[in-house]
Each structure stands twice: as C-alpha cells, then as structure tokens.
Amino acid sequence: MLKGLAITPPTVGRISIGRIVEKNGKRLPEKDDQFTLTTQVQQRGEWLLHPLNESLRKATTGKLRAIPVRFLFNDPDLNLRAEYSLFDRDTGRPVCVGNGETCKRAGDDGIETLPCMSPDSCAFGQAGGCKPYGRLNVTIGDEDELGSFIFRTTSYNSIRTLSARLQYFSAVSGGLLACLPLELKLRGKSTTRSYRSTLYYVDLGVRAGSSLQEAITQARELNASRRAAGFAQAALDAAARAGFANGAFEDSIEESAAVAEEFYPEESGDGGSHDAGRVNATVTSTPSLKDRLDQRAALLGGKAA
C-alpha cells in the first residue's frame, strides 16, 4: 500500500444530525433533531439523500431517530476513532491531531510528534479551535457488507457515550461486536451550558423489540455461520488496523475540507476569530498558519498570566 496514505473503511454514505445552510452569504452548520442519510455527492452545495434515508423513514411514524446498524470490526477502537483535532479553516487540512498523550503536528518542517494535553490546557489548541473529533463507521442493510456509512461528530456527549457503549457491548458479547444487531439512537438532554435548551447526541443500543440476551444469541449464531463460511474477522480487524496506521492523518484532503466547514467554522467561537484578526493585523507580511497559531497561543498565554 502507498506509505503515508491512511487506508480507511470504504464509505458509501454519511450519517448526520445537521446540515450546512447559507446565512448572510456564509455557509454555516445548523443542528437538527433527527438523523439524515446522504450519499457522498453534493449538488448545489447540498448532500444528495441516500435511498436508505427514505426507506428508513417509511419504517417509522415520526422523525428518524433510530437506525439499525452493525459494525465492521470486533475491536471497538477501529469502529470509532476519536482524537483532539485542529484543522486549518482556510485549506481544511489537519494541523494537529492528538490522543491526550502525544500529538502529530504539521509545520513548516514536516510533521512533529509532541506532547498532547486537552484543548483547555493547550495554548496552541485554544488558539486554533482544537476540539474532540470522532468518526464512527457502521454498516446499514446487507447490500454492501464491507461498505460503511460514516458519522462524524465533535460532540463530547456523542463521543463519550459511543465509546462506552462499544466497549461494553464488546465485553458482554465476548468480543463479538461485529455480529451484534444494534441501532444508533438519537437522545436529548439539557444542561446549564445549553441554557436548558435541548442538546441532541448519538447513543447505541440493542434494536427496538429485542433484548440484550437475544442480541448476544444472534451474534453467536452469526459468528458461527461466518466462521463456517471461512469469514476471517480477526484478519479483517488486523487489515483495518494496519490501514489506519499507514497515514499520519486519517481524513483525506477532500474529506477534511468538508469537515472543517461543518465542524470548525470561523463563527463557532471556539478559536477566538476576533483575536486572530487583531494578531494578524500587526504582521506586515503574510504569515504561515503555524505563525498565526503561535501568535494567538502567545496572546492567550499572556492573558492567562
């Protein structure tokens, strides 16, 4: 395989709980209270709906707030990859990606490996709007058993809940996560930070009308059937693990541009865009992204002192 290129699960569609809308000439993210399944094709700035979006909606009486899914891998960390991520909003390229211990940071001299703290403790991350970023791959239906839909999120609630559920379902099933019949669920909660308005996040559970014991029984039966047919799940997990490790950053240039637009907008307030304007105004020549972030990090550090 090509070195430096992350080999990720083949993606046939997207799962979202929001969309991009145009306001005052700017494209901004807008949250929703239901799931939407789209293709990977845009037309006039809108993602085209996937055929499964309509069929799943016909199966429910209200809004689409549950999707039956399975997972490609038994290893929970292969199905959900979550990192602290900072993107360049101008190009969409990832600048710094870390796991809370170490990070890979792109600079003028290439990619460096540095210590990683949480965004709240990192002046460089605060300057650039670093935040948790998760990618969940699931299969829907039986049309393409190795093709997946991807759900991207920067929600603490979704990342934390999905991480816990994946670990728990893997444990109680004896490591048969890829065989469990599960469903993504949209849940709501109110917090002081949301001013008591409803926040929606994604959860994972057994399918409606089934119990955990029944799901585990079905997983064992499916696992036995797959093994009898020669399906090598452990080899599939190993191939995916090697593919993810093959690149410095998971998202491609094309994907990361859309990610930056949806999850890292200038107007989000996560990076102090007004401070950035004041810093850049003092520079007589066009600075690099790293210079701009370093300047903003120094400014934040001065304010903290």
Image (cartoon, rainbow, N blue to C red):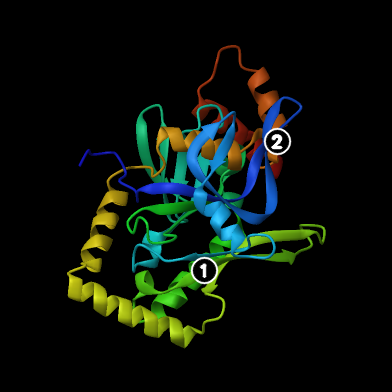
Tag 1 residue: 183
Furthest residue in direction top, as rendered: 284
The quarter of the rendered structure image containing the C terminus is: top right
Side (left or right) of 289 relative to 18:
left
Mark seen at residue 290: none
Task: Pick whichever of labels 2 and 1 is earlier in the sequence.
Answer: 1
Q: Amino acid at mark 1?
A: Glu
- Density class for disc 2 (Cα within 10 Å; few <14, some 14-19, many ≥20) is few
- Residue pictured at 56% horizontal, 32% vertical: 89
Q: Nearer the viewer, mark 2 or mark 1?
A: 1
- Residue pictured at 67% horizontal, 18% vertical: 281
Side (left or right) of 298 relative to 145:
right
Give percent across and percent down for residue 37: 54, 50
Tag 2 residue: 267
Side (left or right) of 5 relative to 124:
left
174 lies above or below 203: below
151 lies above or below 276: below
Nearer to us in this view, 104 or 219: 219
